[in-house]
Image (cartoon, grey):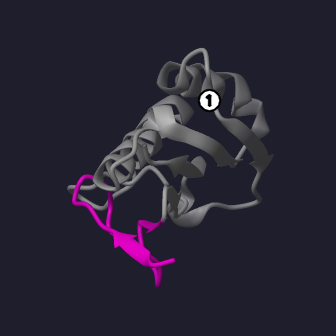
Amino acid sequence: MEREVIQTTGAPRPIGPYVQAIRVGRFVFTAGQIPLDPETGRLVEGGIEEQTRRVLENLKAILEAAGSSLAQVVRTTCFLADLDEFPAFNRVYAQYFGPHPPARTTVQAARLPAGALVEIDCIAVID
């Protein structure tokens, strides 16, 4: 199967040697997204809720560029700098995924890039 690199200006450019996402067949595999503003390349201000919102907006833009959407996400991996923020993170996450959320793993990370409070990657399907 052929691999297609997905790139959009609706999400921040990668800050290392990786791509925003790879499409293989009917699947999209995203890189982990941190709460960088795609226009400035800087970490958004605010706490876990604002940062989670920015991460999910970044993922949404990448998935749409690949021909998918958040509604087609089948799995996420979520990294939080502090699991005490889990309830606030969940409130925002639920707003984006609604009553039929994907499978998920959430772990506390000792440290995330750029001082982020949250990082999320996902796997989605394409209709």
> Vertically, is 42 above or below 75?
below
Q: Position of residue 85 (x, y in %)?
A: 69, 31
Q: Amino acid at mark 1?
A: Phe
> Vertically, is 16 above or below 77?
below
| Foreground pick, 102 / 83 | 102
Q: Which residue is at a point 57% across and 28% down the rendered structure image?
A: 93
Q: Position of residue 62 (x, y in %)?
A: 36, 53
Q: Which residue is at a point 54% across and 18% down the rendered structure image?
A: 98
Q: Which residue is at a point 77% across and 59% down the rendered structure image?
A: 110
Q: Position of residue 91 (x, y in %)?
A: 59, 19
Q: Position of residue 28 (x, y in %)?
A: 49, 58
**22 falls in the magenta region:** yes
Q: Main secondary structure of the magenta part?
A: loop
| Foreground pick, 8 / 114 | 8
Badge 1 is on which residue? Answer: 89
Q: Is 108 left or right of 118, judged from the image as shown?
A: right
Tag 1 secondary structure: helix
**11 falls in the magenta region:** yes
Res 14 seen here: no
Q: Which residue is at a point 23% across and 58% down the rendered structure image?
A: 40
Q: Is 23 left or right of 67, judged from the image as shown?
A: right
Quadrant location of the C terminus in the rendered image: top left
Which stretch appears magenta? Answer: 1-24
